[in-house]
């Protein structure tokens, strides 16, 4: 490849895959979540306390639960696996490394993006492609799950009675947003 003389900026960032996307219906609002830092964290049960202290929030240890503190959210994905999201200053990798506990932390900030789904028809819009029981009794506020939206793997978090965060790989984000937009229209009928 020939050098065209153009210099790459050292601080160049990656474009957000859903920048400017919004939609929904009279009962559902869809929007791209703001940029966030994310890590996929794996650790043994004996190391949860040290990692929790270092990250500034208690890593949840029960299935389908999450924890929120200081702009960070930790989602339980398995007995030794969490998705940690920071919408603030970040530095998740550094915080995990400072724990002194054996763990695996992988920065997945550029792999994932999120879609915020809210309104009285939010659960119905998601259920247009997701088999998860989203009733408040089965999936209360703070509940999270790795599940599917049609053919796409997602991580779903209920942030309020009528609001959800859908974490999806950026390469599937257009598809997921389109499916949720169709579900939002159906929820309004």
Image (tube, helix red, strand yellow):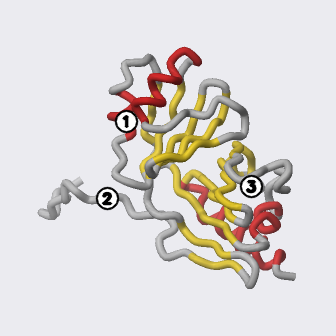
Which residue is the site of mark 2?
Answer: 13
Earlier along the polypeptide chain: callout 3 or callout 2? 2
Name which quarter of the figure residue 186 lies in: bottom right
Q: Are marks 3 and 1 in contact (CB under 8 Å)?
A: no
Q: Quadrant of the C terminus?
A: bottom right
In the rendered image of this protein, does residue 62 appear above or below residue 43? below
- Of 49 and 169, nearer the camera is 49
In the rendered image of this protein, does residue 30 appear above or below residue 61? below
Which residue is the site of mark 3?
Answer: 149
Q: Nearer the viewer, mark 2 or mark 1?
A: 1
In the rendered image of this protein, does residue 79 appear above or below residue 82? above
Please rate how many residues cluster around mark 1, counting C-alpha atoms within 10 Å: few if below 14, some from 14 to 19, many from 20: some
Residue at horizontal 54%, vertical 47%?
Answer: 68
Q: Is residue 22 left or right of residue 147?
A: left
Q: Are marks 3 and 2 in contact (CB under 8 Å)?
A: no
Where residue 40 appears, x then y in whole percent?
Answer: 51, 36
In the rendered image of this protein, does residue 162 appear above or below residue 36? below
Identify the secondary structure beneath mark 3.
strand
Mark 3 vs mark 1, CA separation in Å:
29 Å
Determine the residue located farthest toward the left in the rendered image.
Answer: 5
Please rate how many residues cluster around mark 2, counting C-alpha atoms within 10 Å: few if below 14, some from 14 to 19, many from 20: few
Where residue 180 appears, x then y in whole percent?
Answer: 71, 68
Name which quarter of the figure residue 60 lies in: top right
Which residue is the site of mark 1?
Answer: 93
């Amino acid at each position: 490849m020939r050098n065209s003389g153009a210099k790459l900026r050292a601080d160049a960032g990656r474009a957000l895959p859903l920048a400017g996307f919004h939609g929904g219906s009279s009962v559902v609002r869809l929007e791209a979540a703001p940029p966030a830092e994310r890590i996929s964290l794996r650790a043994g049960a004996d190391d949860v306390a040290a990692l929790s202290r270092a990250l500034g929030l208690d890593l949840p240890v029960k299935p389908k639960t999450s924890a929120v503190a200081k702009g960070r959210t930790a989602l339980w994905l398995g007995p030794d696996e969490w998705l940690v999201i920071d919408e603030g200053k970040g530095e998740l990798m550094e915080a995990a490394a400072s724990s002194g506990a054996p763990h695996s932390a992988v920065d997945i900030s550029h792999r994932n993006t999120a879609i915020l789904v809210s309104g009285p028809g939010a659960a119905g819009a998601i259920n247009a492609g997701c088999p998860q029981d989203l009733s408040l009794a089965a999936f209360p506020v703070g509940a999270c799950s790795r599940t599917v939206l049609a053919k796409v793997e997602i991580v779903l978090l209920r942030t309020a009675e009528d609001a959800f965060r859908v974490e999806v790989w950026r390469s599937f984000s257009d598809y997921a947003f389109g499916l949720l937009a169709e579900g939002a229209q159906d929820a309004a009928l």
